[in-house]
Image (cartoon, rainbow, N blue to C red):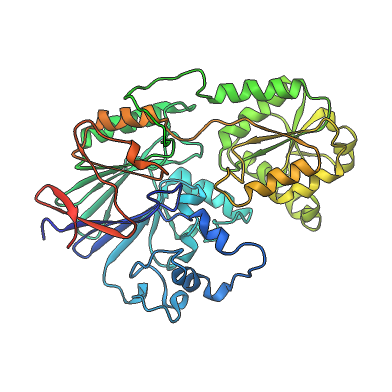
Amino acid sequence: MQDNTTITFWSGLRTIGGTIISIEHGADRILFDFGELFHTQRLFSKGKKIRAQRYTSDLLKLQALPAIKGIYSSHSLLDTPLLPFEESRQQTAVFISHLHLDHIGSIMHLAPDLPLYMTEEGKRLYAALHEINTPSCEQTPDRIWGVEPGERIRIGESIEVELLAVDHDVIGAAGMLVKTPDVKVAYTGDLRFHGIHREKSMAFIEEVKRFTPDILITEGTALREDSKLEPLLDYPKELRQENDVQEEVTTHLSGAAGAAFFNWYERDLMRLKILIEAAKAAGRQVVLEPESAYLAKQFHIPGLYLVYAPCDLSDELPLWESRLPDVKWITKNLLVQHAEKYFVENQFDRLFELLDFQLESSLYIHTNGTPLGPFDPDYDKLISFLESINCKKIDIFCSGHATGNHLQWLVEEINSPYVVPLHSFHPEKLQPAHGVRILPEPNETLRFTNGILQPQE
C-alpha cells in the first residue's frame, strides 16, 4: 500500500509541552511523545481529589488526554466510547524523545502492553527515577525497550524509527528519524546548541541532512512574540551557558553570609555536577536529599557531597542508608547549626524544611528546578513562600532549548520541503526560507500524497 501515510498532531502545538503526534501507514502506527500539558494539573488543583480508578477516563472527558483509538486499556476507559487497545488491530508503538514531564508525563495512561521505546540511557535514568518513586515514572521499567543511538526499530511492516542523541538538559535525549514507504519525517525532540554536549546536536543535524526528510517537525520553545530571527549559530553574551551557571553560583555563594539552598531538576545530572563544583569553589559543601544522592551514585557524578534526611523520610532512613552505604550523612541539627558551611538541596515539595533554618541573609538558588516557570501552576506558590520567609530567590539557569536564531539556522540547514514548528507559544515566528511552513490545529490529520502534505478530507 503506497501513498497513504498520515500524520496527526494531537497536542503540544501552541504550548510548552504535551507533545503527542502519531504517524500511520496502513495497519502500522507510531506515537511520539506522550507528555503532560501543565493545564492538566490546573484541572485538579487544590480542593479536588483525583478519582484513581477513573483517572484516564476523567481526563479523556475533560479533553486533557487525546481521544486516540487503540492505546488505552478497556480497564482504564471504563464507559468511554473509544476503541480499547485490546480490540485494536493496528501495530502500535510509542517513542519517547526524553524524560521531561511535558514529553513523558502521561504514559501511565497507556495500555500496559503497548510497546514503549526510548534511548538506552533514557531507560537507565527512568529506572533510577522509578526506584525512588518519582512522579511520572510509576510504570515498571520492564515495559520499556531501550534503544541504542542509531539503532533502527521496525514497527509492523511499514514504519522504521531511528533515535539519535541530541544535547538537552536531561541525559538520554534524542531526536527521531521516521521512514514509511512514501515519506520521511525528522523530529528534533527538544535540543540545544549551547550546552555541554552541543556536538550531539550538531551530529544530529548532519544525520538529518543525510536523511533528507520530506517533513521536519521541530521544537520552538524559545520563539517569542517579538522574535526577529536570523539563521545564525551565534553565542551572544546574554546567552547563559553551563560554565556561566557554575561561575554565577560560585559568586553568589561566596558573597552569602547565611544559609544557602538550591533547587535543581533531578533529571539534569550534569547540572548537579556543576553545582557540586561551584559550591566547592565557594568553600561550601553540597548537601543532597537522599533521592538526588541515589541518582548521583547511580550515574557516577564526581565530587564530595553529604546527605541529610528530610522529615518525611525519617521512617525510611534505614532503607535509604542501605541504598547509600558509601556516602556520609549529616544530621539536620548539625546542618542547621553550621548552615554557612553548606549548600543545601531543597526541592519544592519540601519547602517547609527551610523553616528549621536561621533565614536571615539566606539565599535560594533556583536552577531549572520545579516548578520550572510561570506556566507551571506551582510557580507562584514558590515565590509567595520564599517571600513570606524573607529568603532571597535567585534564578541561575541555562536553557535546554535552542535559541530562536539557532532554530532558524536549523531549519535552513536541513532545508526540508515542509516544516512544522510546535512546542511553542509562537510557532508562527519560525518561517523557512524555501520550504512550506505548516501550523496544524490540535487533532488535525495531514495526509502525504504524491509528495504533497495536505489536510485529510
The quarter of the picture where the N terminus appears is: bottom left
Find the residue positioned furthest to the bottom. Answer: 79
The quarter of the picture where the C terminus appears is: bottom left
Residue 158's place in the image compared with 252, above or below, is below
- Left or right of 448? Residue 311 is right
Q: Is residue 301 in sight in this rendering?
A: no
Front position in the image: 68 or 175:
68
Residue 198's place in the image compared with 68, above or below, is above
- Left or right of 58? Residue 230 is left
Residue 406's place in the image compared with 375, above or below, is above
Find the residue positioned furthest to the top. Answer: 237
Percent position (x, y) of residue 55?
A: 53, 71
Q: Residue at 54% of width from left, 56% of height from top?
A: 137
Q: Is residue 244 in sight in this rendering?
A: yes
Q: Quadrant of residue 234?
A: top left
Percent position (x, y) of residue 383?
A: 69, 43
Percent position (x, y) of residue 108?
A: 49, 63
Q: Residue at 69% of width from left, 46% of height from top?
A: 382
